[in-house]
């Protein structure tokens, strides 16, 4: 495995945000995501579920390769909890894989709506502020870019295909799921502290948020208040995306 990781460890100079590389790849990814999501949304809803499950497989396999790459190439055969895969943008990997188990239950529409709102938000924001995506290796940089482009595709495909609930009730039904994920992220942050620095959801109780703008807010208000403001901002952003879909597709309301 180490020899395989060495073969894909091509170094690069990390691109700067707003560079030609950033703008061109982001624009191409957005255009392709919108086009494919719209075209594929015209298929049967069962086809949408198969596509989403395939997206989960692609995300899962690529994340496994990324973890091996980080372990062998970047971190000298030690595990760095900073890269544990449980960020907000990691959730579609898990949710798409469990869709066959929940899609036919009353909870299925909650998972669909969550990915439409929150993970579309995460993909868009990561491409808008990509400093965390650019690394000194081509593999990690392309992985980060393609991952978040795929999140945008997943969110748009769900929104276009009518799998989600565009009503106000539909949005509020996602908040308990978001809260549960925040609790899991917080537990990982706390439990992993003796072994290393973990910052799942960027709400560690030990460090100010590393996210742009919110880092300065946390320095001024304190970590706890800063984290709460950050989580509220995520909820607000998810609501704005939900509102946009409700205006575009008013017929898709439970």
Image (cartoon, grey):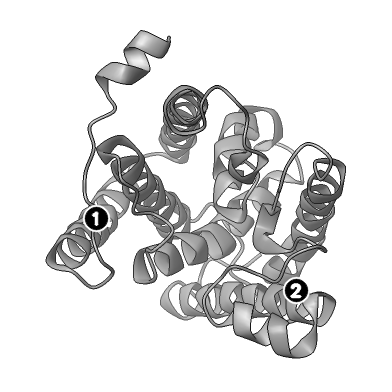
- Reading the image, the residue beneath label 1 is 29
Q: Position of residue 168 (x, y in %)?
A: 68, 76
Helix, strand or loop at disc 1? Answer: helix
Depth check: give the residue in front, 103 or 69: 69
Helix, strand or loop at disc 2? Answer: helix
Tell me the residue at 47%/78% (across/down). Answer: 244
Q: Position of residue 187 (x, y in %)?
A: 86, 48
Tell me the residue at 75%/70% (across/down). Answer: 172
Q: Residues within 10 Å of mark 2 (few under 14, many from 20)?
A: many
Q: How many marks?
A: 2
Q: Residues within 10 Å of mark 1 (few under 14, many from 20)?
A: many
Q: Quadrant of the C terminus?
A: bottom right
- Reading the image, the residue beneath label 2 is 227
Tell me the residue at 43%/28% (across/down). Answer: 54
Left or right of 5 on screen, residue 241: right
Quick check: 174 above or below 161?
below
Residue closest to the far front: 76
Q: Give the CA distance from mark 1 to mark 2.
A: 30 Å
Depth check: give the residue in front, 123 or 211: 211
Nearest to N terminus: mark 1 or mark 2: 1
């Amino acid at each position: 495995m180490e020899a395989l990781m060495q073969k894909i460890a091509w170094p690069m100079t990390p691109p700067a945000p707003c560079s030609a590389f950033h703008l061109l790849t982001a624009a191409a990814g957005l255009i392709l995501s919108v086009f494919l999501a719209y075209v594929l949304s015209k298929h049967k809803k069962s086809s949408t579920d198969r596509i989403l499950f395939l997206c989960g497989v692609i995300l899962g396999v690529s994340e496994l390769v990324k973890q091996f790459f980080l372990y062998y190439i970047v971190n000298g055969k030690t595990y760095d909890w900073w890269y544990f895969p449980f960020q907000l943008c990691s959730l579609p990997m898990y949710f798409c894989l469990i869709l066959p188990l929940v899609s036919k239950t009353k909870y299925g529409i909650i998972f669909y709506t969550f990915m439409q709102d929150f993970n579309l938000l995460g993909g868009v924001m990561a491409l808008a502020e990509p400093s965390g995506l650019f690394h000194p290796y081509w593999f990690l940089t392309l992985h980060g870019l393609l991952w978040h482009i795929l999140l945008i595709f997943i969110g748009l495909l769900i929104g276009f295909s009518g799998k989600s609930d565009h009503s106000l009730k539909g949005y509020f039904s996602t908040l308990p799921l978001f809260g549960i994920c925040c609790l899991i992220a917080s537990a990982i942050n706390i439990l992993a502290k003796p072994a290393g620095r973990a910052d799942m959801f960027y709400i560690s109780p030990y460090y100010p948020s590393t996210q742009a703008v919110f880092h300065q807010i946390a320095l001024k208000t304190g970590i706890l208040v800063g984290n709460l403001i950050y989580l509220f901002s995520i909820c607000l952003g998810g609501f704005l995306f939900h509102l946009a879909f409700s205006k575009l597709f008013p017929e898709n309301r439970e």
